[in-house]
Amino acid sequence: PDQVFLVIESSLATLKRDLGSKSRAYAAAGIAEYWVIDVKHAKLHVFRRPFEGDWTERLILTADDSVSPLFAPDADIALKSVF
């Protein structure tokens, strides 16, 4: 996990698992940041800063938002380009 800065899942049929068991597994492993692209609802679920097997920061973003990964805070990604 110390070499993984960000995991991104594109989720259509596996959203429940991606937001549930996979999210918990990544948090438990100490992955710094985990994003799930909810293709069907055009949302980005952002999980950050794991602590004791859970995430301390959770965001749900839409196409009107932008996001920057923790490892590259100056890289502003307009979610309109994703959805």
Image (cartoon, rainbow, N blue to C red):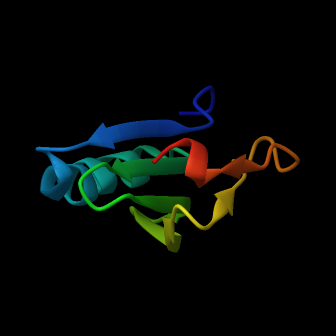
x and y, in percent, of residue 71 in the image: 76, 42
Residue projecting furthest to the right: 74
* Count of numbered tags: 0
12 sits to left or right of 72: left
Q: Is residue 54 above or below residue 15?
A: below
Q: Nearer the viewer, residue 33 or 53?
A: 33
Q: Is residue 75 above or below residue 48?
A: above
x and y, in percent, of residue 23 in the image: 32, 54
Residue drawn where x is 33% and y is 38% of the image: 10
Residue drawn where x is 62% and y is 32% of the image: 2
64 sits to left or right of 73: left
Q: Nearer the viewer, residue 30 or 69?
A: 69
x and y, in percent, of residue 70 in the image: 73, 50
Residue drawn where x is 48% and y is 37% of the image: 7
Q: Nearer the viewer, residue 52 or 18?
A: 18
Q: Nearer the viewer, residue 75 or 54?
A: 75
x and y, in percent, of residue 4 in the image: 57, 30
Residue drawn where x is 15% and y is 51% of the image: 17
23 sits to left or right of 49: left
